[in-house]
Amino acid sequence: MPMAHLLINGVLREAADGRTFPNVNPATEESIGVAPDAGREDADAAIAAARHTFDNTTWSQDHQFRAHCLRQLRDGLYAEQENLRQILVQEAGVPVALTHSIWLDTILDAVSYWADLATSYPYEVQMSSRATLAGVTSQRTVLREPIGVVAAITPWNYPLPLNVFKLAAALAAGCTAILKPAPDTPWSGTALGRIIAERTDIPAGVVNVVTGAAPRLGEVLVQDPRVDMITFTGSTGVGKRIMAAAADNVTRVCLELGGKSANIILDDADLPSLAAQIAGVCAHAGQGCALTTRLLLPRSRYDEGLAITQAAFESLRCGDPSDPDVIVGPVMNATQRDRILSLIDKGKQEARLVVGGGRPGYMPVGFYVEPTLFADVSPDAVIAQEEIFGPVLVVIPYDNDEDAVRIANNSVFGLSAAVHSPDTGRALSVARRLRTGTVGINGAVWLAADTPFGGYKQSGLGRELGADGFAEFLETKSIAVPG
Ligand code: NAD
């Protein structure tokens, strides 16, 4: 791949001290190139550029211009769609089949949503005439203004969409931004920076992209008082550290964190038709925050459900992500693989291993883990509580709907869930009792540009996408004049 570049104050360049770090293709374990290893000096320049541009240009007030720039960005992304597809396959091991859906193709037009919001959002609301609490009347106007400089920090598992969602919403709102992609996936972030620099009128300093090998780079961004907001997607552990660091400057945080979501199959469900949906938990080797990694089967149909799930898992094979028939590619790196394998070992002590359980002998090169199925799992088992972030499903029996809700909610996470029943009313009643930010009923998809996404409990704080996600990037100002 061509050398990746930082984008700082409109200039595509190397790190100030010229340092780079290698990037490895998880399917081949071979280097695909080097990315700039930005240091404190680069982070400082990026923050200074974003701050200066926000404070001294008309970017934050010119809604029409921002909409124009976002449409250019959308068109630029479309123009480089095939290049972006190759990047996702090579840097993150995303199966090419998945890039035809929410990993790439279907998210590009979402930029139009933010382009439209840039001009259509009610930034100014006139309140009705009413006495104030002080007993006098006054005319009050509520303004929504961009919060300012945003640090956007993203993970490796869903890199391009998250970079796009965060930047597009921040820019639509009138903010300026510093994007810091994960060390494992610098290319989709730097490609976005290059597209912005080369294909749009987005002014210098509005978007800055910094890549680095170590967490230190992210720490510099979240501790800087010139940053007004941190939008972070990643693990719950790092999210907690960021929230603590942000407290020093009372910086706003929007956190999209981990999950351990339940897939609840009610006892009237058509089980055979659910095999593909259940096995979908292994897509992209199970590296998805909202994947339903706990399968809750009714005890009355447990053996039938388990047999169907076992057959589905036995038919899954890991493979080269550039093969269009593959949906289970490699996991991100050796550290992730070893972490998953150690949790699988833990699972072998606390539950019944049904399928998989190790590295696939037929894929000797690459960071692969077999699709793995555990049955008879206790709701409190480590493998039922920890986010494994690999192709691992745990099956938990339950007695009745009440029990299913209780088990589903028995988690520090609350990101997502799925419910299956031909009786939609019954499924909805279960969905309403789940403490999660999203629920899909009978395979319906909630991911959409206009629909808020985020977590309850330790799955996050705030929302991404939709009007709620847009409002995260706004401050509220109430003005009163006599009258
Ligand atoms: P991670 O938390 O290790 O890293 C995420 C980002 O934070 C990276 O860019 C990393 O460099 C940076 N970072 C690390 N330490 C930092 C610090 N102290 N200060 C500032 N930045 C720091 O996550 P990951 O391993 O890249 O991604 C996997 C995790 O992301 C999983 O837990 C997954 O559930 C979660 N995730 C959540 C969502 C969601 O929307 N809720 C979506 C995708 C992934």
Image: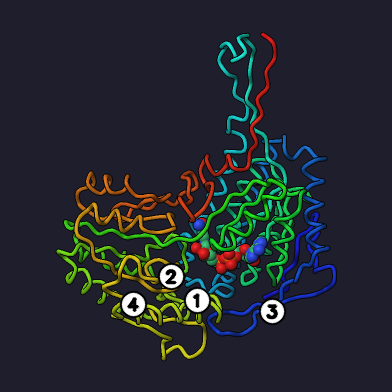
* Residue linked to disc 2: 286
Labels 2 and 4: the sequence-earlier one:
2
Q: Mark 2 near ligand 1 (CB under 8 Å)? A: no
Q: Mark 4 near ligand 1 (CB under 8 Å)? A: no
Image quadrant in which you'd find residue 404? bottom left
Q: Residues within 10 Å of mark 3 (few under 14, many from 20)?
A: some
Residue type marked 4:
Glu
Left or right: where does residue 43 sit relative to residue 91? right
Q: Is residue 81 above or below residue 433?
A: below
Nearer to me, 481 or 282: 481
Left or right: where does residue 117 sit relative to residue 37? left
Labels 3 and 2: the sequence-earlier one:
3
What distance separates the C-alpha of mark 3 from that of mark 1? Answer: 18 Å
* Residue linked to disc 3: 22
Q: Is residue 268 visible?
A: yes
Image disc number at residue 331: 1
Residue type marked 2:
Gly
* Residue linked to disc 4: 350
